[in-house]
Amino acid sequence: MQNAPLADIEMAHCWCGANSDKEGGIIAKDGATMKEFVYKICSVCATERVDPRPPAGAIGGYYATDYASHRVRENDLATRFKNLVSNVFFALPNERPAFSRFLKPFLFPFKGHTVFAFYAVSPRHIFEFGASSGNDLARFREAGWQVDGCEPSAKACASAGERGINLQNVPAEAANLLPKSFSCILLNNVLEHVHDPVAVISKAYAGLVTGGSVVIILPNHAGPSARLFGAAWPGYDAPRHLWGFNPENLASLLMRAGFTAPKVYPLFQGRWAWRDCLDGGRLPYRARSWRRRLAGVGSFALTPLGFLAAVAGSGDFLTVVATKP
Ligand SMILES: [Zn+2]
């Protein structure tokens, strides 16, 4: 197999096994290669998917060498705020910060905006699929966790290695997890990138101890921005985002693997995402600088509206947490 020539494209049926689609589907252009891709919509489960798509051996060529998610982030103000949120809601009662009870109503809209949005059991050992340069794992390590993960980008792996986080340099499907060893498995903006989500979720299930949680953060293709802005919304990042999930079909994927019905937290998106929505997405900047400026201003108005929509239960992104019974 290894020496077989790589085709540029492959056909993919839905993860649910169905191979029939609804009419229509978003057409999204890759800003780098200017190639067009169609997001087909499964007629059974409504998961969206890029079809045809670049196969696993070719997808790396569609990621920029300075792909934003691979950059090393330091502990900034936002990270410290997220730590406060997770401690108020998810720490053991005797480990919660002072005044937690009074902070809860104010912090409630941010409850899902943390990679720690789950109740931990022992051992405190995490595996992260698509761990990038180790930004999330560094936070877990600071909180006293043993950390492991995998990442397909050799460059991101090297960045993680420089901070003492050794990752398996493989795609999620090829990761090697010791069974029943982890109490948390994290996929932070990763599940929509993997070729075989069923295999990855099964791996997560097998790796978890009883009572352990899988935490999935991803774009919500049933959210307001997906509907209003279509291909301009960053959730349609073709062809890197191979799948478009919504809370229902993601729950089916998890429950089919054996997980309990997941807890879903709606997230609101950052201003950068609104700016992409308003200025038409990821075309080259210089061609439309006036529009970029207008979008910059407009995004200030839309960010709080997205926040209110998420508080009302309709997020542009989701944190989904499911437990192994
Ligand atoms: Zn389907």
Image: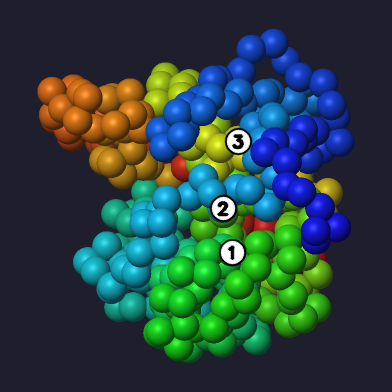
Does 224 sit above or below residue 307?
Answer: above
Bin the neighbour count of mark 1 within 10 Å (Cα to Cα): few under 14, some 14-19, many 20 and up: many
Which kind of residue does numbered mark 1 sit on? Pro
Label 2 vs label 1, nearer the camera = 2
Q: Residue at x 51, y 28 (%)?
A: 35
Question: SS at mark 2?
Answer: helix
User: Quadrant of residue 68 in the image?
Assistant: bottom left
Question: SS at mark 1?
Answer: loop
| CA distance for labels 3 and 1 | 21 Å
Front residue of 322/27: it is 27
Front residue of 26/10: it is 10
Kindly tell me whether residue 212 is visible in this rendering. Answer: yes
Which kind of residue does numbered mark 3 sit on? Gly
Residue 23, position in %: x, y?
Answer: 69, 11
Q: Which mark is residue 60?
A: 2
Q: Which residue is mark 1?
A: 152
